[in-house]
Amino acid sequence: IYGGGVYLQESSPSISGCQINDNYSSDCGGGISIGYQSSPIITNCQFNDNECNPGGGGGVWIMYTSTPSFENCEIKGNYVPADQGGGVYLTGSSTGTFTSCLITENIALQGSGGGIIANSSANAQLLDTTVCANQSGQISGSWTDLGGNTVAAECPLIDTNGDGVSDVSDNCD
C-alpha cells in the first residue's frame, strides 16, 4: 500500500492545515506518497510519527516526475527500517521544495538519510528550512541550498514560548 495517510497520483491539489500523523504503509510513504506527475502545494501541515516498512519515506515519499511544494510544514518522528529517508524520500526525477519547514527526529535505521534522502536524479530544494536531530544523518543525495537553512546534528534553540529569549524553557512541553 502506498501512502499510509494520503496517496496522490497525477494530481496537484492544495492541502493546508492537515495533521497526517500515526499512519503506516507496507510499501512507500508512511504519511503521504506523492506519485507520478503530481505537483501538490502543501502548507501548514504535520507529518509526524508515521512509518513505512520495508519501503521508503517514513513521513513523505516523492516519486518520479513529481514536483511538490511544502511550506511551513513539520516532518517529525517518522521511521523506516532501512536507509530510505526516515523523514523524506525522493526518487526518480522528482524535485521537492521545502520552504520554512522543520524536518527533525526522523529515523532511517540503516545507512543514511534520516532526514532526507534523494536517490537517482531526484533533488530536494531547501529554503529557510531546518533539518536536525535525525538518526542516520541529516541529508543524503542531491539537494539545493536556496538559503537560510540550518542542517545540524542537534537542533538549535528556538524561541517557541515567545518570551524573546531562546533558552532551555523553549524546549519544554
Image (tube, grey):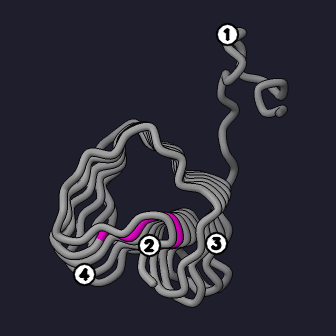
Which mark is in front, 2 or 1? Answer: 2
Question: Of marks 1 and 3, which one's residue comes earlier in the chain?
Answer: 3
Which sits in the foreground, 153 or 164?
164
Residue 3 got which mark?
Answer: 2
Asked if disc 4 and disc 3 are in contact, CB closer than 8 Å, the reply is no
What residue range appears in magenta? 30-34
Asked which secondary structure carries label 3, the reply is strand
Asked if disc 2 and disc 1 are in contact, CB closer than 8 Å, the reply is no
Which mark is in front, 4 or 3? Answer: 3
- The image shows a total of numbered marks equal to 4
Q: Is residue 134 above or below residue 84?
A: above
Q: Is residue 168 above or below residue 96?
A: above
Distance from disc 4 to disc 1, alpha carbons, whole Å, reads: 43 Å
Residue 92 got which mark?
Answer: 4
* Residue sitting at x 54%, y 86%: 26
Q: Which residue is mark 1?
A: 164
Q: Which residue is mark 3?
A: 79
Using the rendered view, name the quadrant where residue 50 is placed.
bottom right
Distance from disc 3 to disc 2, alpha carbons, whole Å, reads: 14 Å
Residue farthest top in this picture: 163
Question: Of marks 4 and 1, which one's residue comes earlier in the chain?
Answer: 4
